[in-house]
């Protein structure tokens, strides 16, 4: 039982504000992933939870208890670092036993706990080796094992997979997911900038940008209802297509204009004052399809086709009023389209996202807050 | 295919070879010389002692009191060489004008009708019908081959009679603590400079780096004055081993701290944070992680500081008395240079003795220089 409560947390390094008034609650037993572009403050936030970075203002509570002034060891957390951070002069066993030895646990208990962790991670045969005799994946497992042996309430992971190659990354990702299942009492907080990791591992994703939370939600929520342009562009690969659109008519079937030729009927309810405003229309590549009717379709010039068998990525150009917009369509199968073609697309019903001038999601005449 | 000749690599190899020869030749010469007979040392270079050489020597036979009478002849027998050095006589003479007048074994007839024979092993026989009258023996000039011959006599002499042995022990008594004390202090200090946050840390570091450029000669006299005052105050000797330890510690503090700080700074930050999360206090981290990983740095700093102290003359002269129980090797050698300057056997041997420890230290700690102890801790 260890929920984490973060209340208006701030942190600056010198003059640069790295964490800007963040509030966040992480439920007990959840798997929370913090994502965001490089330098947005993910590691800093995690290190503040761990107690490795001082808190400027605000409060962090773990299991209801303020930990602002507690050293890392008293916070009942364990952390897995990006660089593994193993002790190079100790064997794998001693690496994993280090924390327990410092706690002055009995020899037999240390042995049991290390063996148990080694069994879970399948590194029992490596216990006598030194870190330099291990592969990257094995080292990462030892690092995770070191966290497990201490039996913490909260696991903190800082990009644990980013030094592994693609195949190993997938395998270890699955192991971490299994680990969460096998330790149902533990709360896990996981930092990454890889959105596939975020989507696959998390119950809850926190999207961070420049020290601020952009959105908190389940993976599907973020995917289907991004709160703002930042999240819309950040989640999903290839990224969501965004093109400016000017509202021509409001009312029952509102119409927006992309350029003189292309007019699209929108699904959002607008207020009459929205007429003439510039919005951002977003649609995911997989929500584009080849137009079967003329209604609500638009044409684009294909500039590149990447055929991957299972699906094809079609890169195309829409002539806008002032500039061209590049869009990507993800079409299933192997469509007969090639470079230079003019293709007519349609956006799937109810898969349009609308964002206002400030980049916030716009639904039914209201700004999302 | 063209064979590419890398001139810069050849040049650097040649340069290396040059320096190796430059260093080895005098060292080796010193080494050989220290084992040579002192008389030979005075007259020929060390390289001649490695092969059989021809030497010209002057010897004197025994005088009249050793003659024996035998069947009407007076005979003096003996050996020209004082000890068995494996020398072989090739030829001999009886006047300085013609030192090769006779082959070995030939009989030389002298003006007074006496006969003399010299044999290969140095045995000689003087034979005369009349009694030998002279108290002193005859001079005999010989040309002999001399095989390489080495002796430990110089070492015995220098170590035990000249007092270099005691000086050697004194130097160890100075150098070991004067190396270990700063190493211990600085390891704590560098750790705190690197991994602990406290007020004025950066200023302290800057001061240390700045003090690297202060020449120690500047502070010798002020410190000695303080020592004298303290000594007078507590009624103890101003010049003592603890005094010299402290002096060396002080002088070594800045550079040792700087080197260690430089090393510890390079330890991966995340590893120490992992230790912190694991519940290690600063002391635990220091003892269980930083020290074991710093052994290569300790070794190289140990070597540097030890050699510096071992070869130091100035600090030892200023802070230690010259009586035998305190004098250090370098000071003793300097003293010998003055008093026994013409006795090469003493100087070469002394010099070589003073070199043995640095050589030993260097070669035995060499392996600790090998890097890569940190490999495996972080990615890569
Ligand atoms: N100790 C520090 N001193 C000064 N600035 C720092 C320090 N640590 C981090 N920063 C700055 O804070 C910002 C956030 O850093 P942080 O490491 O949290 O980013 P991140 O989101 O983890 O990025 P990445 O995905 O690249 O790991 C960066 O601009 C970084 O330069
Ligand atoms: Mg980071």
Image (cartoon, coloured by chain):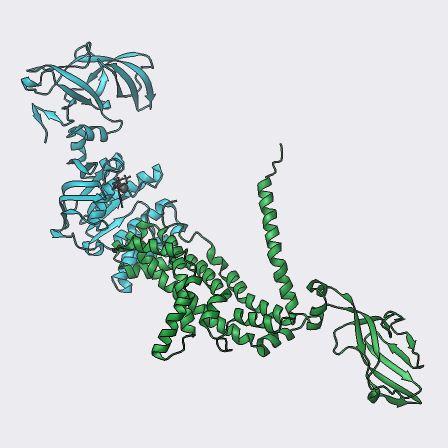
Assign the C terminus of chain B to one quadrant of the image.
top left
Residue occupying the point 17% across, 17% down: A245
> Chain B in the picture: what colour?
green
Residue occupying the point 52% across, 72% down: B168
**Res B162 quadrant in image:** bottom right
Q: Is A3 placed above or below B127 here?
A: above
Q: Position of residue B355 (x, y in %)?
A: 56, 65
Q: In the displayed structure, does residue B133 sit left or right of residue A219?
A: right
Question: If the picture is divided into quarters, which one holds ligand 1?
Answer: top left
Could you say which is closer to the camera, residue B264 or residue A314? B264
Residue occupying the point 55% across, 68% down: B354
Q: In the displayed structure, does residue B172 sit left or right of residue A190?
A: right
Q: Is A131 placed above or below B223 here?
A: above
**Res A73 quadrant in image:** bottom left
Q: Is B79 placed above or below B344 here?
A: below
The chain painted cyan is A
**Res A101 quadrant in image:** bottom left
């Amino acid at each position: 039982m260890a929920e984490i409560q973060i209340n208006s947390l701030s942190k600056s390094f010198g003059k640069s504000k790295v964490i800007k008034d963040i509030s966040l609650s992480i439920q007990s037993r959840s798997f929370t992933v913090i994502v965001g572009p490089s330098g947005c403050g993910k590691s800093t936030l995690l290190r503040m939870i761990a107690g490795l970075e001082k808190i400027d203002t605000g409060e962090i509570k773990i299991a209801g208890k303020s930990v602002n002034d507690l050293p890392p060891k008293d916070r009942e957390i364990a952390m897995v670092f990006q660089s593994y951070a193993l002790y190079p002069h100790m064997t794998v066993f001693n690496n994993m036993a280090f924390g327990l030895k410092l706690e002055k646990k009995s020899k037999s208990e240390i042995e049991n706990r290390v063996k148990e962790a080694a069994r879970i991670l399948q590194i029992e045969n490596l216990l006598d080796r030194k870190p330099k005799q291990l592969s990257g994946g094995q080292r990462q497992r030892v690092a995770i094992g070191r966290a497990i042996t201490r039996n913490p309430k909260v696991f903190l992971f800082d990009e644990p997979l980013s030094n592994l190659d693609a195949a190993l990354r997938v395998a270890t990702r699955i192991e971490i997911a299994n680990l969460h299942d096998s330790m149902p009492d533990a709360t896990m907080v996981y930092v990454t900038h890889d959105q596939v990791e975020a989507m696959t591992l998390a119950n809850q994703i926190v999207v961070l940008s420049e020290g601020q939370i952009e959105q908190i939600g389940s993976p599907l929520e973020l995917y289907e209802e991004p709160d703002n342009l930042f999240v819309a562009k950040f989640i999903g690969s290839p990224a969501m297509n965004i093109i400016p659109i000017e509202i021509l008519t409001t009312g029952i079937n509102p119409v927006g204009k992309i350029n003189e030729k292309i007019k699209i009927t929108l699904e959002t309810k607008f207020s009459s004052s929205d007429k003439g405003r510039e919005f951002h229309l977003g649609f995911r590549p997989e929500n584009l399809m080849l137009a079967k009717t003329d209604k609500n379709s638009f044409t684009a010039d294909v500039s590149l086709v990447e055929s991957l068998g299972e699906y094809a990525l079609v890169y195309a150009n829409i002539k806008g009023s002032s500039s061209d917009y590049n869009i990507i369509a993800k079409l299933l199968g192997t469509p007969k389209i090639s470079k230079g073609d003019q293709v007519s697309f349609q956006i799937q019903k109810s898969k349009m996202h609308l964002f206002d001038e400030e980049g916030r999601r716009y639904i039914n005449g209201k700004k999302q807050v | 295919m063209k064979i590419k000749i890398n001139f810069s690599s050849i040049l650097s190899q040649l340069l290396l070879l040059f320096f190796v020869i430059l260093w080895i030749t005098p060292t080796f010469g010193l080494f050989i010389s220290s084992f040579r007979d002192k008389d030979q040392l005075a007259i020929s270079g060390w390289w001649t002692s490695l092969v059989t050489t021809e030497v010209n020597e002057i010897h004197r036979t025994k005088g009249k009191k050793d003659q024996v009478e035998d069947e009407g002849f007076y005979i003096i027998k003996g050996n020209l060489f004082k000890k068995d050095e494996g020398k072989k006589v090739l030829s001999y003479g009886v006047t300085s004008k013609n030192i090769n007048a006779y082959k070995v074994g030939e009989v030389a007839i002298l003006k007074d009708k006496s006969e003399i024979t010299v044999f290969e092993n140095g045995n000689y026989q003087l034979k005369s019908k009349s009694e030998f009258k002279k108290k002193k023996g005859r001079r005999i000039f010989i040309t002999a081959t001399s095989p390489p011959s080495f002796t430990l006599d110089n070492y015995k002499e220098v170590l035990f009679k000249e007092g270099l042995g005691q000086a050697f022990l004194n130097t160890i008594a100075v150098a070991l603590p004067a190396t270990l004390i700063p190493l211990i202090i600085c390891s704590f200090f560098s750790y705190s400079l690197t991994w602990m946050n406290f007020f004025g840390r950066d200023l302290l570091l800057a001061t240390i780096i700045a003090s690297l450029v202060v020449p120690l000669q500047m502070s010798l006299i002020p410190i000695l004055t303080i020592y004298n005052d303290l000594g007078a105050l507590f009624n103890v000797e101003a010049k003592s081993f603890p005094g010299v330890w402290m002096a060396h510690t002080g002088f070594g503090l800045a550079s040792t701290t700087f080197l260690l700080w430089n090393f510890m700074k390079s330890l991966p930050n995340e590893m120490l944070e992992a230790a912190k999360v694991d519940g290690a206090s600063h002391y635990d981290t220091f003892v269980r992680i930083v020290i074991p990983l710093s052994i290569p740095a300790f070794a190289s700093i140990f070597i540097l500081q030890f050699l510096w102290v071992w070869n130091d003359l100035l600090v030892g002269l200023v802070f230690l008395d010259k009586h035998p129980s305190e004098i250090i090797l370098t000071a003793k050698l300097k003293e010998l240079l003055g008093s026994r300057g013409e006795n090469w056997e003493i100087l070469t041997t002394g010099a070589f003795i003073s070199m043995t420890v640095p050589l030993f230290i260097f070669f035995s700690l060499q392996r600790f220089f090998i890097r890569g102890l940190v490999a495996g801790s972080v990615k890569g």
